[in-house]
């Protein structure tokens, strides 16, 4: 037996245990090199279906497929050893029945090696969350603003201002908590509602546009890095501004290729003269 204890990745149960201890840190990632850079700094990496917009230029997350999620889930797993990795179940891969949800989630876990899946939905998804968690699939819930419902809700505005909306988000979160989710993302929700939920559910709440009252925070990595500049929601803070740096680099490269100053001697293979 080896005397060296190998450090294991954080598990969904470790994320749950952080509630009340310290804020939980999460970001999305979709590729190996980005996952590698963020891995030492985050508790869990979310392979979000936001990749549809961020990487593929789609208008919404509705067009994202299970195959896309699996390919990017594998890439993120290859780039990480510390963080718990959670992969989003995309639209159409789980809503129809709890059995379909199990098949999709089992594929994601088997083919990527990740530890958990995320699915959007409140009370209507509680039976599915219960079905999955009892069968060995940890689930990260997602309530409040649910981008996969864009075609029925019609927009991305923040929610919870009216009593009716606030009550719906509260009861959705309670249903997913009772069903056994190890954590719950609350998206685009006003502070008092996020605070209420955080104080009442057992699972840690992970906010995105849902105030500092949540037990942790998640953001889309390209927003944090200032790469995705189509628009900036109010809740996003850019911790870097990479877009202008990237543009400058592309322009400099183009100039040097045109001027034949790149590749230079040091980038060029020569045949060594034999003696
Ligand atoms: O797809 C996504 O990126 C998400 C957010 C919670 C960040 O679901």
Image (cartoon, grey):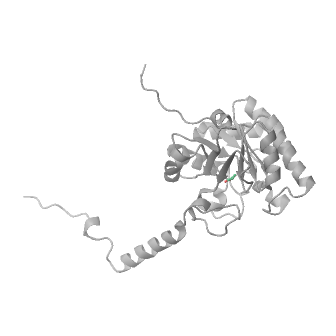
Q: Tell me where residue 83 sits by quadrant.
A: top right
Q: Quadrant of residue 109?
A: top right
Q: Which residue is nearer to you in this view: 247 or 15? A: 15
Residue found farthest to the top: 1
Numbered marks: total: 0
The percent position of residue 85, horizontal first and vertical second, equals 60, 42
Residue 121: in sight, yes or no?
no
**Where's residue 231, x and y in %?**
67, 69
Residue 171 x, y percent position in the rendering: 87, 44
Q: Is residue 164 above or below residue 252?
A: above
Q: Residue furthest right?
A: 164
Residue at image location 58% in from the left, 36% down from the top: 10
Taking depth in this image into account, of 89 and 159 the one nearest to the observer is 159
Q: Nearer the viewer, residue 257 or 167?
A: 167
Asked if residue 134 lies left or right of residue 87, the reply is right
- Give the quadrant of the C terminus: bottom left
Instruction: Identify the residue at horizontal 53%, vertical 33% (top origin).
Output: 8
Name the residue located 54 percent from the left edge and 47 percent from the top edge: 41
Query: Which residue is painted at 79% across and 48% down in the image?
Result: 195
């Amino acid at each position: 037996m080896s005397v060296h204890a190998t450090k294991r990745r954080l598990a969904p149960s470790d994320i749950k245990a952080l509630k009340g201890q310290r804020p939980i840190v999460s970001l999305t990632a979709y590729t190996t090199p980005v996952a590698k850079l963020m891995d030492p700094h985050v508790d869990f990496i979310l392979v979000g279906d936001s990749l549809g917009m961020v990487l593929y230029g789609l208008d919404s997350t509705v067009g994202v497929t299970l195959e896309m999620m699996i390919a990017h889930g594998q890439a993120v797993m290859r780039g990480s050893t510390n963080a718990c990795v959670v992969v989003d179940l995309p639209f159409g891969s789980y809503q129809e029945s709890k059995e379909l949800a199990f098949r999709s989630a089992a594929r994601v876990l088997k083919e990527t090696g990740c530890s958990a899946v995320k699915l959007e939905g409140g009370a209507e998804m509680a039976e599915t969350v219960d079905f999955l968690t009892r069968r060995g699939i940890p689930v990260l819930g997602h309530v409040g603003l649910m981008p996969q419902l864009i075609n029925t809700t019609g927009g991305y505005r923040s929610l919870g201002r009216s009593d009716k909306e606030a009550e719906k988000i509260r009861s959705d979160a309670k249903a997913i908590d009772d069903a056994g989710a190890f954590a719950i993302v609350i998206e685009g929700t006003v502070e008092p509602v996020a605070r209420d939920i955080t104080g009442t559910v057992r699972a840690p709440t992970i906010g995105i546009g849902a105030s500092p009252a949540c037990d942790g925070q998640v953001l889309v990595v390209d927003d944090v890095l200032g790469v995705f500049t189509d628009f900036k929601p109010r809740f996003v803070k850019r911790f870097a501004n990479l877009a202008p740096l990237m543009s400058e680099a592309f322009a400099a490269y183009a100039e040097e290729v045109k001027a034949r100053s790149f590749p230079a001697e040091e980038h060029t293979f020569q045949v060594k003269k034999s003696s």
